[in-house]
Image (tube, helix red, strand yellow):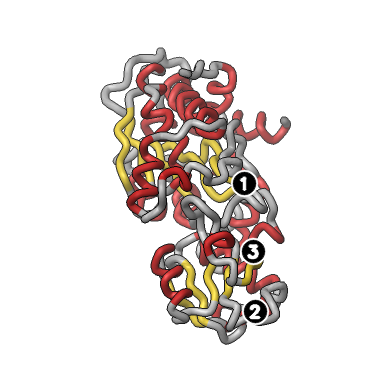
């Protein structure tokens, strides 16, 4: 509670639109969204009309990666970014840009999510993957250099005394990586969220290491970021946006499936019914920000010289809108 009050006070002093009366927004709030199943809660809120009910209409816009969205968020091109941890967030804040983490979205749940799990072909790892030192000299598929998957691989290698130079990297998307594993073009793969059945169910012959979940259980990998329009506006506006979002996340976590998720499943060659069984316990229903996760990532980024220093929580986080949303929750719709 002490940390939350300290963060709240610091954020209010730096960015507060104190004393302003709440007014209807001049236009819809622009939401930056990646096309990932983790966006199901946001789309639930959109489909159920929660943002409209809150008096905060939204304009969802697709993005490729959070690194692309952060400078646009800071420049006011977006108002909210539902993104993943990346060095760009910390660098933007360190440079004084009006970007803040305002809520947490997803966490690593062992047995629930494939995020950060390392899979290997049985032929390449006949004795299993319990000892990651076996990755030395192997071909490993991961996301781009700025991707969270790269962070996962690096910290896992570091934990067993290896470096990224000890493996041959292949930067591949999810479907490309799966195909490369099947074709024996790579030996191992750092997985991300997948639709429907887990990778272990679909490919029972692959060896599995719990990856990040083994050293950072509960790691929070995605957040809700606000830009200047909401940070510098009336707290009620940003709070209502947050309340609508959290209502959608709660509905999704308790079983509602938005049309978005069915469409995404079809586009990835997965039956919608299978995608609906995707584990939903990764969602953070109350929006709590896990400070240990931010610190762990920030320290890694400093070691890799991606970020100049470790930032204080009150520099990174603005809890005013989450506090408002908790005090003024939105009712759900059937």
Quadrant into which the N terminus falls: top right
Q: Position of residue 303 (x, y in %)?
A: 60, 67
For residue 312, which numbered disc appears in the image?
1
Q: Position of residue 165 (x, y in %)?
A: 55, 82
- Mark 2 / mark 3, whichever is N-terminal: 2
- Residue drawn at x 58%, y 33% is 285
Q: Residues within 10 Å of mark 2 (few under 14, many from 20)?
A: some
Q: Is residue 86 left or right of residue 259?
A: right
Q: Position of residue 123 (x, y in %)?
A: 58, 83
Q: Are marks 1 and 2 in contact (CB under 8 Å)?
A: no
For residue 211, which numbered disc appears in the image?
3
Per the image, the residue denoted by label 2 is 162
Residue 11 visible in rendering: no
Out of 1 and 172, give the one closest to the viewer: 172
In the picture shown, does residue 80 fall above or below 108? Answer: above
- Residue drawn at x 45%, y 43% is 273
In the picture shown, does residue 166 fall above or below 286? Answer: below
- Mark 3 / mark 1, whichever is N-terminal: 3
Q: Nearer the viewer, mark 1 or mark 2?
A: 2
Q: For the view shown, which residue lies furthest in the bottom direction? A: 137
In the picture shown, does residue 131 fall above or below 34? Answer: below
What separation in Å lies between label 2 and label 3 (alpha carbons)? 15 Å
Residue 278 visible in rendering: yes
């Amino acid at each position: 509670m002490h940390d939350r009050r300290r963060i709240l006070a610091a954020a209010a002093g730096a960015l507060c639109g104190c004393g302003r009366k709440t007014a209807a927004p001049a236009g819809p709030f622009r939401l930056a969204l990646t096309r990932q199943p983790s966006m199901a809660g946001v789309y639930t809120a959109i489909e159920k009309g929660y943002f409209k009910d809150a008096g905060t209409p939204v304009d969802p816009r697709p993005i490729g990666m959070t690194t692309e969205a952060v400078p646009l968020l800071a420049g006011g091109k977006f108002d909210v970014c539902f993104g993943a941890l990346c060095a760009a967030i910390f660098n933007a804040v360190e440079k004084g840009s009006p970007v803040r983490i305002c809520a947490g979205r997803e966490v690593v749940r062992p047995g629930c999510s494939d995020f950060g799990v390392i899979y290997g072909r049985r032929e390449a790892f006949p004795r299993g993957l319990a000892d990651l030192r076996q990755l030395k000299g192997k071909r490993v598929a991961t996301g781009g250099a700025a991707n969270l998957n790269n962070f996962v691989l690096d910290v896992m290698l570091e934990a067993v005394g290896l470096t990224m130079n000890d493996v041959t990297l292949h930067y591949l998307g999810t479907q490309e990586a799966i195909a490369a594993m099947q074709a024996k073009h790579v030996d191992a793969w750092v997985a991300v969220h997948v639709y429907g059945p887990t990778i272990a169910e679909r490919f029972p012959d692959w060896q599995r290491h719990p990856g990040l979940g083994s050293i950072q259980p509960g790691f929070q990998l995605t957040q809700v970021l606000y830009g200047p329009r909401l940070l510098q506006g009336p707290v009620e506006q940003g709070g209502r946006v947050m309340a609508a979002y959290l209502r959608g996340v709660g509905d999704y976590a308790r079983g509602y499936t938005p049309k978005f998720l069915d469409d995404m499943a079809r586009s990835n060659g997965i039956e919608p019914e299978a995608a609906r069984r995707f584990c939903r316990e990764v969602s953070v229903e109350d929006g709590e920000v896990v400070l240990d996760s931010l610190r762990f990532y920030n320290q890694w980024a400093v070691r890799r010289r991606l970020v100049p220093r470790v930032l204080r929580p009150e520099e990174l986080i603005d809890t005013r809108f989450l506090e408002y949303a908790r005090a003024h929750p939105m009712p759900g719709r059937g």
